[in-house]
């Protein structure tokens, strides 16, 4: 009986001891924060004829004309009253050196349109339903 009781006590001690290696395996891994390599830019946007410009407090970039620039141009049209009005926008854009020798030193390639920051005016040609 003493042997059985001793064996039972030994078994309880072994099971009751916490194994650090096992605890590390069971613990949930910490979530890693990924840093977004594409900067978010807030500035005034204008697109006229075949050139686009994004101007912020401390930068002025030419805008690479691609499908995203065309989409942004269409989205800001309702907020413009004149052809040369600039509209404040928030975009994610990749900044690249300008390979062409004319214009700005750097151009931006718009990757994502986050928001149009102008007051949400109702376009003049849009009817308001009551």
Image (cartoon, rainbow, N blue to C red):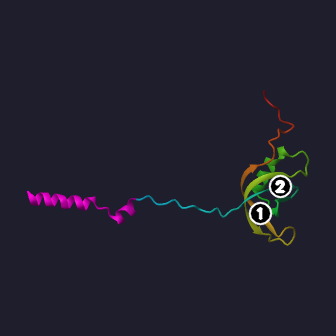
Q: Is residue 3 magenta?
A: yes
Residue 30: x %, y % from top left: 49, 60
Left or right, residue 20 beside residue 79: left
Q: Name the residue that disc number 2 marks.
A: 44
Left or right, residue 114 beside residue 61: left
Taking the spot 89% from the left edge, 50% from the top edge, the residue there is 85
If the image is split into quadrants, where does the C terminus sit?
Answer: top right
Q: Which residues are magenta?
A: 1-26
Q: Residues within 10 Å of mark 2 (few under 14, many from 20)?
A: many
76, above or below 15, in the image: above
Q: Is residue 93 magenta?
A: no
Q: Residue furthest top?
A: 130
Q: Residue furthest left?
A: 1
At mark 2, the secondary structure is strand
Taking the spot 38% from the left edge, 59% from the top edge, the residue there is 26
Q: Residues within 10 Å of mark 1 (few under 14, many from 20)?
A: many
Front residue of this view, candidates 59 and 100? 59
Residue 65: x %, y % from top left: 80, 59
Q: Which mark is residue 108?
A: 1
If the image is split into quadrants, where does the N terminus sit?
Answer: bottom left
Residue 79: x %, y % from top left: 84, 45
Q: In whole angstroms, how far apart are the C-alphas of marks 2 and 1? A: 13 Å
Residue 117: x %, y % from top left: 78, 48
What number of labels is visible? 2
At mark 1, the secondary structure is strand
Q: Which mark is residue 98?
A: none
Is tag 2's residue or tag 1's residue first in the polypeptide sequence? Answer: 2
Taking the spot 91% from the left edge, 47% from the top edge, the residue there is 82
């Amino acid at each position: 009986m003493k042997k059985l009781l001793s064996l039972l006590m030994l078994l309880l001690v072994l099971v009751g001891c916490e194994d650090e290696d096992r605890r590390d395996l069971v613990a949930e891994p910490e979530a890693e924060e990924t840093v977004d390599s594409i900067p978010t830019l807030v500035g005034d946007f204008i697109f006229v004829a075949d050139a686009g410009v994004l101007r912020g407090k401390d930068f002025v970039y030419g805008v690479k004309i691609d499908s995203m620039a065309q989409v942004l141009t269409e989205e800001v049209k309702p907020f413009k009253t004149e052809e040369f009005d600039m509209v404040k926008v928030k975009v994610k854009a990749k900044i690249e050196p300008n390979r062409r020798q004319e214009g700005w030193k750097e151009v931006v390639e718009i990757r994502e349109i986050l928001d149009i920051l102008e007051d949400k005016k109702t376009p003049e040609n849009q009817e308001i339903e009551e």
